[in-house]
């Protein structure tokens, strides 16, 4: 054991490190009498949320108003608590193009882990900073596609530009093909 | 025993047969070598280069899918060199493969995806844009996305090697290789779905289930197909309350993973919106109204009991479809025989299979095949008589193709079709000797075959000495007849000679023979033929009747016909009666039961008061002249258990909703006698119940409880009662020819109807109607069920009369024109299409759309077996109108479905 | 039924098929025959050939698409094939294509509206020492300049041939007529 370690042992250095915040506030508030309020008057005042805050999940659109979601079901697969249900189908009028015909999120079960956002291959999902979603009826928390798109519209007014080719190396990613006959059923 | 060699793979020694491929040997010790183009069913092609391995003493890496093992070979699959090679090949493939997994239906079960994960490439040296194919319409059911293609050509090879269809081709070259049909036209083929199943990536997918699923979402149920008697194993993939798709895995079941259009695309009737969901009862206003089970069952039981008390048990008859499970069939006949007490019951095996079953029982003592599919594949001569095997029994057709193409068997065909290369396979193209037999003349052809056996001196010498009387009398009877008119005599004799000269041979017979006048006699005559050649009792030889419906074999064995008790045993067989009475703890009625047509006659006469019909629609299946509708209307009580409100159900007083095979537990017996499991993939639709459950509840209400906890308990009882069901295994032994029975036939049995069997029969009457019209199954439709399957309707949505192009040209008829058919008894107007395989002077009409022919009634009942023959007609043809727009290629869209 | 083949051509078919041990072997010569007849291989011709050789039409189609020298759509009366391989490219394939475009107004793969000329680019025609060059039907035109090209095209358009033709070269040389 070195000398430095010995000194640390005798001076309870680790404890001091752990209590750094407490001691600082104690000195500021009690000894120096600097009494600025730290309680926030919610809901009149709201906190600044960190950039990485994970609130309600939203579906996004491209700048031309077309929803980004391609209905790939990967969010459903990624979700650890089975929040998401995707029913995908072929786009009417554009055979071979896939989209989510129906999209449900049961927010009562959501952990806000963000795995669905990570999983999305087209960045169609995003976490907003909305959190005031207390409801009297829990059924109201089963959000459907229009609600999720509205969330997106509300929180992300600037939309991403749509690229015909998502990436120069990716040929035909969900471009759709006009004038082909439709799916059988 | 094959010669064995020992090789070392990754340090592990393994002993395999000589000729095994390295990739196969590796698989056996659990070393999976990545591959795309290799498939155990197909010949090695080694075009994807993914399966490279290091073999000691070979200078370069070898493709393990085309390298055959050799003694002392040392293979390494996990060295850095091999790994590097795999990575590079994968990089080449990914140079053009789009990263569109999120919208690809194969995502989650894609070989390329799996291998990419395994080698985790993080970048590519290719910076050019990927190749892009112009997307076009490929077909109504099969979708192709060529951007995803890895050019392994599995689909092309499958289409050629297994299906013998050759509808897919690889056009262009190098990077721009593309899977196409002819000249960019929409795909027109058998739609077996094999290319969808075998594609390792998402280049070829099914349009029916497109975008509706991810593999991990689906529940899978291993079950058995409900269309034909081939008994294919299916995997029903369901999501929620819906069947999403059907698959079949390689190495599994009697079909070994191969399916036909009906099996692969014909599942949607299960979720059809017209399915009955509640019981319906005809009420005072004369209409059917929905009621609950609790309301209908007691009332129904009371009505049945009243009729039984008032008119006797013999006033009640029953009819069941041979598409039901063995459990349903067994309980149905037990219900009829015990709870009702009547022997008047029949099943749809009456439409043809009874002919074959009776003949087989009479001669060889067992109603089963004495051969199996393996014997068909191993046979070196196959004789097909009136089978239309590709359309009616596609998987047996594949076995025949395998025998001919892989094992070099000699195919002999006595079929209506003539060789002609089209985009669906035609079994007669493969035949070494083909005799064109017009519809209705197959029985005559069979008599000619027996005569040929004598004329060519093919009779077994041992038999002649053992049963001289039999041989001489058959000789006298058969040779007294002339060779059938209009058939090629020399070819017929050559067929008999070629067949007799084989080491192993199987005769396959189908509906053209069994569902035509003389069906029963022809089956016996063919057994004569086998006996005369001395082959019937030899292993690998046999007569194999193919069945139209999936469980006709089971229907006969469960005793769901008037003449048979479970077993099948004759109703009058004392020993069988004692045994069954022991199991049932009650005597089955001894009276002679009436078969279907007799029941209809009795109903018309007013002696039959009530009928219970399960899953069958006689009003549609029988031609108008059978007057089924008027007979059923006369009944006091008609009960129908059905999936849909059929023509018969519309006449019923009580309609009970039944479950389809996708919702039932049970077993089906296929035509070769394999008893296979049916497992439910779905919960029953609406309030529907399995047929056996309905009958069971009814019996309880009638005071004769036939109670079972589940279908397995019924199977247990079946296994106790029927000897053939005691061994239910993966590989039951084929039934054996009973020597006693053959002896009896040779000494006495043959003589009883000898003159009838060898009479020239009614020669085709030369009347003004010179066209022979055959009604039969097509590749895409079988029965009425398939016309509720959206996918199959996309392929064929209306019944079109098929004629030879030369005939059509002579009459000035174009595709899509309408013609009027006139027979002695009526007329009908139908659209026309052309196929070269239909011989000149012959017409063909798909049986599933026979409503269109309702105006052409014609039916001849068989005097012995009561089989209604209504599939061959003679008609005249007149053109009445041009088709106009409907003759064009675009497939018609049908409303409804999802 | 009308055939894509003339009577004379149809008479040659059995002989061609008989040359090969397997029927399928006659596929390429029969396709050539079809191309000789119509200038291209039509779908009808492919179907007929499939019928003779016991193949399905897709199998014939895959062969036709594999070989670049079978035309799948009608071409002009004169088929201009410009060599685009390395040697010719170095001395001016692009220039040559430009001259042809200036003269006839067609680009690679196109046919003039009067149906006389079709332009295509092909791989090496074996005149590496004398590029840039083009082949019109069976004749070679080498060491082309703009003037020469114009003259060749004018002559061919007017008379169907041009004295500047320098081929075809064959080895061994065919016997003198």
Image (cartoon, coloured by chain):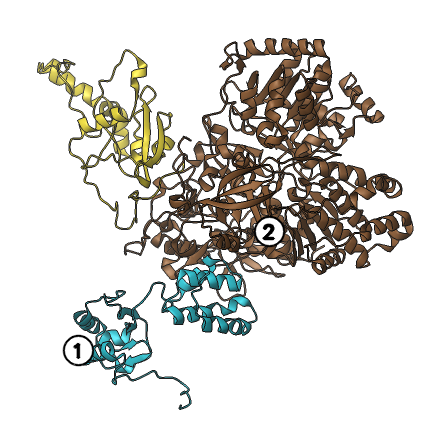
| Quadrant including the C terminus of chain A | top left
Residue B496 in the figure: left or right of residue A19:
right
Per the image, label 2 sits on a secondary structure element best described as loop
Q: Is residue B658 visible?
A: no
Pair 2/1: label in front:
2
Give the chain ID for the cyan colour.
Answer: C
Residue B151: x, y in percent?
Answer: 42, 55
User: Which residue has dot 1 on it?
Assistant: C146
Residue B310 in the figure: left or right of residue A46:
right
Give the chain letter at badge 1: C
Which disc is residue B162 wearing? none
> What hue represents chain B?
brown
Give whichever of B434, B187 is nearer the camera.
Answer: B434
Give the chain letter at badge 2: B
User: Which residue has dot 2 on it?
Assistant: B417
Residue C16: x, y in percent?
Answer: 51, 73
Residue B606: x, y in percent?
Answer: 68, 17
Residue A123 higher or lower than B77, as above or below: above
Give the chain ID for the yellow colour.
Answer: A
Give whichever of B684, B892 is nearer the camera.
Answer: B892
Give whichever of A5, C97 is nearer the camera.
Answer: C97
Residue C69 higher or lower than B601, as above or below: below
Residue B708 higher or lower than B284, as above or below: below
The extreme front residue here reads B768
Same chain? Circles 2 and 1: no
Q: At 43% across and 71% down in the image, what residue appears?
A: C33
Q: At 34% across and 63% down in the image, what residue appears?
A: C73
Per the image, label 1 sits on a secondary structure element best described as helix
Q: Residues within 10 Å of mark 1 (few under 14, many from 20)?
A: some
Residue B733 in the figure: left or right of residue B56:
right
User: Rounded to the nearest whole Å, what is the CA distance between mark 2 and mark 1?
Assistant: 64 Å
Give whichever of C111, B330 is nearer the camera.
Answer: C111
């Amino acid at each position: 054991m070195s000398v430095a370690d010995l000194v640390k042992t005798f001076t309870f250095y680790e404890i001091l490190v752990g209590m750094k915040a407490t001691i600082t506030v104690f000195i500021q508030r009690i000894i120096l009498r600097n009494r600025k309020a730290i309680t926030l008057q919610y809901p009149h005042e709201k906190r600044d949320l960190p950039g990485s805050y994970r609130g309600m999940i939203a579906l996004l659109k491209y700048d031309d108003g077309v929803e980004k979601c391609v209905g790939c079901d990967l969010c459903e697969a990624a979700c650890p608590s089975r929040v998401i249900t995707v029913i995908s189908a072929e786009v009417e009028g554009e055979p071979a193009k896939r989209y989510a015909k129906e999209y449900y999120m049961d927010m009562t079960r959501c952990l806000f882990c963000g795995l669905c956002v990570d999983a999305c291959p087209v960045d169609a999902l995003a976490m907003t900073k909305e959190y005031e979603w207390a409801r009297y009826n829990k059924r109201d928390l089963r959000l459907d596609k229009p609600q999720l798109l509205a969330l997106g519209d509300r929180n992300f007014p600037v939309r991403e530009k749509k690229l015909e080719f998502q990436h120069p190396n990716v040929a035909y990613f969900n471009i759709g093909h006009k004038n082909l006959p439709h799916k059988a059923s | 025993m094959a010669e064995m060699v020992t090789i070392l793979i990754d340090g592990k020694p393994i002993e395999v047969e000589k000729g095994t491929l390295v990739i196969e040997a590796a698989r056996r010790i659990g070393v999976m070598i990545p591959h795309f183009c290799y498939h155990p069913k197909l010949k090695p092609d080694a075009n994807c280069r993914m399966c490279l391995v290091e073999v000691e003493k070979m200078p370069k890496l070898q493709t393990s899918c085309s390298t055959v093992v050799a003694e002392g070979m040392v293979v390494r699959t996990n060295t850095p060199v091999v790994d590097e090679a795999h990575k590079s090949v994968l990089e080449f493939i990914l140079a053009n493969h789009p990263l569109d997994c999120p919208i690809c239906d194969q995502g989650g079960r894609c070989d390329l995806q799996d291998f990419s994960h395994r080698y985790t490439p993080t970048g590519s040296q290719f910076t050019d844009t990927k190749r892009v194919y112009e997307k076009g319409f490929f077909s109504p059911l099969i979708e192709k996305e060529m951007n995803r293609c890895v050019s392994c050509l599995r689909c092309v090879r499958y289409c050629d090697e297994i299906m013998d269809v050759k509808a897919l081709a690889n056009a262009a070259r190098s990077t721009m290789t593309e899977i196409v049909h002819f000249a960019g036209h929409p795909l027109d083929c058998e739609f077996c779905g094999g290319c969808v199943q075998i594609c390792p990536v998402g280049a070829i997918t099914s349009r029916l289930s497109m975008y509706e699923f991810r593999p991990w979402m689906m529940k899978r149920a291993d079950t058995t197909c409900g269309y034909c008697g081939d008994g294919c194993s299916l995997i029903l993939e369901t999501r929620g309350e819906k069947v999403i798709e059907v698959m079949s895995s390689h190495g599994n079941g009697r079909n070994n993973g191969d399916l036909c259009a009906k099996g692969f695309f014909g599942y949607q009737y299960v979720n059809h919106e017209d399915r009955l969901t509640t019981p319906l009862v005809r009420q005072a206003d004369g209409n059917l109204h929905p009621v609950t089970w609790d309301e209908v069952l007691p009332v129904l039981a009371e009505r049945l009991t009243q009729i039984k008390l008032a008119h006797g048990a013999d006033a009640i008859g029953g009819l069941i479809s041979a598409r039901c499970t063995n459990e349903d069939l067994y309980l149905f006949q037990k219900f009829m025989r015990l709870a009702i007490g009547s022997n008047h019951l029949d099943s749809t095996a009456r439409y043809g299979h009874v002919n074959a079953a009776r003949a087989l029982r009479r001669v060889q003592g067992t109603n089963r095949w004495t051969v199996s599919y393996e014997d068909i594949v191993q046979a070196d001569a196959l004789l097909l008589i009136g089978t239309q095997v590709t359309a009616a029994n596609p998987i047996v057709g594949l076995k025949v193709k395998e025998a001919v193409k892989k094992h070099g068997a000699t195919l002999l065909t006595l079929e209506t079709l003539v060789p002609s290369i089209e985009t669906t396979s035609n079994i007669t193209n493969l035949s070494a000797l083909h005799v064109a037999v017009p519809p209705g003349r197959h029985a005559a052809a069979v008599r000619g075959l027996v005569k040929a056996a004598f004329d060519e001196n093919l009779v077994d010498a041992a038999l002649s000495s053992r049963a001289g009387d039999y041989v001489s009398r058959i000789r006298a009877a058969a040779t007294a007849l002339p060779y059938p008119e209009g058939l090629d005599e020399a070819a017929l004799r050559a067929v008999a000679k070629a067949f007799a000269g084989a080491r192993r041979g199987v005769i396959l017979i189908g509906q053209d023979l069994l569902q035509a006048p003389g069906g029963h006699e022809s089956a016996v005559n063919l057994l004569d033929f086998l006996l005369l050649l001395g082959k019937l009792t030899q292993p690998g030889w046999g007569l194999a009747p193919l069945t139209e419906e999936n469980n006709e074999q089971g229907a006969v064995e469960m005793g769901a016909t008037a003449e048979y008790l479970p077993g099948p045993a004759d109703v009058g067989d004392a020993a069988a009666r004692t045994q069954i009475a022991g199991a049932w703890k009650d005597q089955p009625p001894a009276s002679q039961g009436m078969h279907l047509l007799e029941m209809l006659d009795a109903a018309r006469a007013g002696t039959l008061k009530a009928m219970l019909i399960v899953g069958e629609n006689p009003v549609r299946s029988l031609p108008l002249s059978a007057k089924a509708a008027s007979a059923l209307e006369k009944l006091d009580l008609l009960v129908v258990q059905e999936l849909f409100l059929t023509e018969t159900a519309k006449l019923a007083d009580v309609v009970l909703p039944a479950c389809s095979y996708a919702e039932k537990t049970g077993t089906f017996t296929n035509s070769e006698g394999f008893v296979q499991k049916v497992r439910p993939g779905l919960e029953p639709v609406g309030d529907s119940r399995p047929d056996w459950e309905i009958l069971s509840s009814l019996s309880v209400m009638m005071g004769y409880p036939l109670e079972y906890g589940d279908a397995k308990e019924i199977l247990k009882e079946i296994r106790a009662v029927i000897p053939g069901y005691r061994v239910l295994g993966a590989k039951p032994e084929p039934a054996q020819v009973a020597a006693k029975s053959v002896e009896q036939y040779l000494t006495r049995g043959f003589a009883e109807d000898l003159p009838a069997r060898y009479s020239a029969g009614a020669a085709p009457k030369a009347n003004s109607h010179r066209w022979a019209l055959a009604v039969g199954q097509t590749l895409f439709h079988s029965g009425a069920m398939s016309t509720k399957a959206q996918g199959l309707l996309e392929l064929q949505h209306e019944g079109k009369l098929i004629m030879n192009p030369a005939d059509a040209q002579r009459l000035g008829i174009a595709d899509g024109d309408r013609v009027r058919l006139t027979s002695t008894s009526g007329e009908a107007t139908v659209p026309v299409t052309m196929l070269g395989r239909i011989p000149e002077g012959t017409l063909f009409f798909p049986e599933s759309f026979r409503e269109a022919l309702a105006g052409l009634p014609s039916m001849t009942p068989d005097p012995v077996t009561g089989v209604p023959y209504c599939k061959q007609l003679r008609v005249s043809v007149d053109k009445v109108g041009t088709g106009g727009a409907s003759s064009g290629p675009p497939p018609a869209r049908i409303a409804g479905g999802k | 039924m009308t055939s894509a083949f003339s009577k004379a051509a149809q008479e040659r078919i059995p002989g061609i098929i008989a040359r090969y041990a397997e029927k399928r072997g006659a596929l390429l010569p029969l396709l050539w025959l079809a191309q000789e007849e119509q200038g291209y291989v039509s779908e009808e011709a492919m179907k007929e050939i499939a019928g003779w050789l016991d193949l399905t039409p897709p199998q014939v189609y895959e062969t036709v698409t594999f070989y670049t020298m079978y035309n799948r759509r009608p071409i002009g009366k004169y088929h201009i094939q410009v060599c685009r391989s390395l040697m010719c490219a170095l001395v001016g394939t692009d220039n040559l294509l430009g001259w042809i475009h200036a003269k006839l107004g067609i680009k690679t793969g196109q046919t003039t509206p009067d149906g006389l000329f079709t332009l295509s680019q092909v791989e090496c025609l074996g005149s590496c020492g004398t590029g840039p060059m083009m082949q019109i039907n069976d004749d070679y035109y080498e060491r082309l300049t703009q003037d020469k090209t114009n003259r060749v095209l004018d002559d061919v358009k007017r008379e169907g041939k041009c004295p500047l033709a320098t081929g075809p070269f064959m080895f061994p040389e065919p016997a003198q007529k």
